[in-house]
Amino acid sequence: MLEALRTLRCSGTLVLGDGTGSMILQLAKGQVEASFKLGAYARLDAAGQTFHLNPHEPSELPELPARRLTSGSPLLRALPRLRPPATLPLGSTDLTTLLDRLNAESFDGVLSYESRDDVARDEIAVALFTNGTIKAAVHERAGRLSSRTEALRILQKRSSETSAGSLELERLDRPVAEALMALALDLVVPDGADAAFTGVEVDDTGFRFFRQGQPYLSVPGVPHGAARRYALTGAQAAHMASLSLPTEPPGWEEQRYALTLRGRDALNPMTELNMEFRNHNGELGQRVLDALGQGGTLQQTAEELGLELVDLKPWLGKLEGSGMIRLQRG
C-alpha cells in the first residue's frame, strides 16, 4: 500500500490498525514524513489489519476530518474516524446484549446512529466508551442537543427501529477516547505549561491530540470559543461514572398526561390550592403542571420547558401522586 501511495505521490493521513493499537502515518507526496504509534501496534507487514486513508494537502500534523464540522457539540466536532466501522443491523440489534459484550471486551470507541433520509438527515447520536462502559453521550437533531441519558434514550430508540439510517460501532485507541471524554465532560486543564500534556487542545484552527507533550493528530475545525486544553488524570479515568441505558419502557417519552380537577384548581390563582401549590413547588412546578396540561408528549413537554426527560420524570411521580395529573390511555 505504501509503495502504491508513493507511486501516486499521495499526500494525506493513513491510519493502520490491528487488535492492539494503531499506527498513524503522515504522508507528503508519497513519502512518510512522520509516524505515531498508539497502543501496542505490532508491524506494518502483519496480516489482518484495518486501514483508513484521508487524502489532504501536506500539513504540519496528520489530519482526519471531524464527524460533524459545524455541530454544536465539541465531541462531534472533534471526533475523528480512525478505523472502518462495523455496521450493525437496525431493528434487530439488542443494545443491552451488545453493551454487555463491549463491557466484557473493555471496549474503547463509539457507538453511533446517523440518519440517512431527507427528513431527518441531520440527526446523529453517539455514545463514547472507555474501558467497556459509556462515559459520555450526545444527540443532535436540527441544531438541538441533548446529552447523557437523553442521548442514550434516542440511541436506544433508533437502534430498535427499521429506518433509513446506519448504526455503527467503531474502535478508538485509548488515548483518543480518553481525550474525547475529557472534552465531552468539559474537564479543562488549568493554564500553565505542562511538558507531558496528554489530552486534546482546541483553538481557532481545530483540535490537536497530544500524548506526553507530543501532538500526533489534528482534526481541523472552525473558530468556536476560547483556546483551551482538556485532559483527565489517572484518578479521574479510574473513577469516572458510567452511563446506563434508560430503564423506562420503549415509547415512554411519547406518553401524555392530562390535568385532573385538582390539577386545574392548582393553576387557578383564585383558589386556595393555587397558593399552597406555589409555596410547595415554586414557579418551576407551576410551569411543569401547566405544560403537562397542554396535552403534548413527555418529549415535547420537556423540550418546551427546556428540561431533560430525566429531570422531568420526578415531577411526574410527584404530581401524579398528589392527584394533579393522570396518564392518558390509548
Image (cartoon, rainbow, N blue to C red):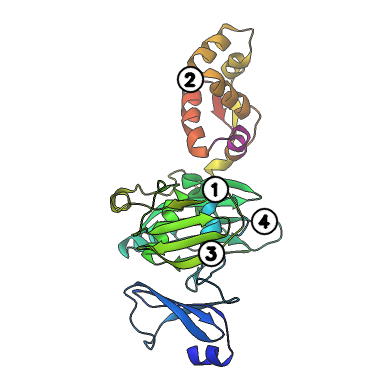
Q: Amino acid at mark 3?
A: Val
Q: Amino acid at mark 1?
A: Ala
Figure check: 166 above or below 238: below
Please tell me whether mark 1 or mark 2 is closer to you in this view. 1
In the rendered structure, which segment of residues is drawn in magenta?
A: 300-307
- Asked if disc 1 and disc 4 are in contact, CB closer than 8 Å, the reply is no
Q: Position of residue 321 (x, y in %)?
A: 46, 23
Give the CA separation, mark 2 to mark 4: 39 Å
Q: Which residue is mark 2?
A: 322
Q: Which mark is residue 120?
A: 4
Figure check: 263 above or below 10: above
Question: Considering only order in the chain, which callout, 4 or 1, is on the residue closer to the N terminus?
Answer: 4
Give the CA separation, mark 1 to mark 2: 47 Å
Magenta run includes residue 305: yes
Residue 203 located left or right of residue 104 = right
Q: Amino acid at mark 2?
A: Ser
Q: Position of residue 193 (x, y in %)?
A: 38, 53
Mark 4 closeness class: few <14, some 14–19, many ≥20 residues within 10 Å: some
Q: Which residue is mark 1?
A: 226
Mark 1 closeness class: few <14, some 14–19, many ≥20 residues within 10 Å: few
Question: Considering only order in the chain, which callout, 1 or 3, is on the residue closer to the N terminus?
Answer: 3
Q: Which mark is residue 79?
A: none
Q: Tell me the chief SS of the magenta region.
A: helix
Please tell me whether mark 3 or mark 1 is closer to you in this view. 1
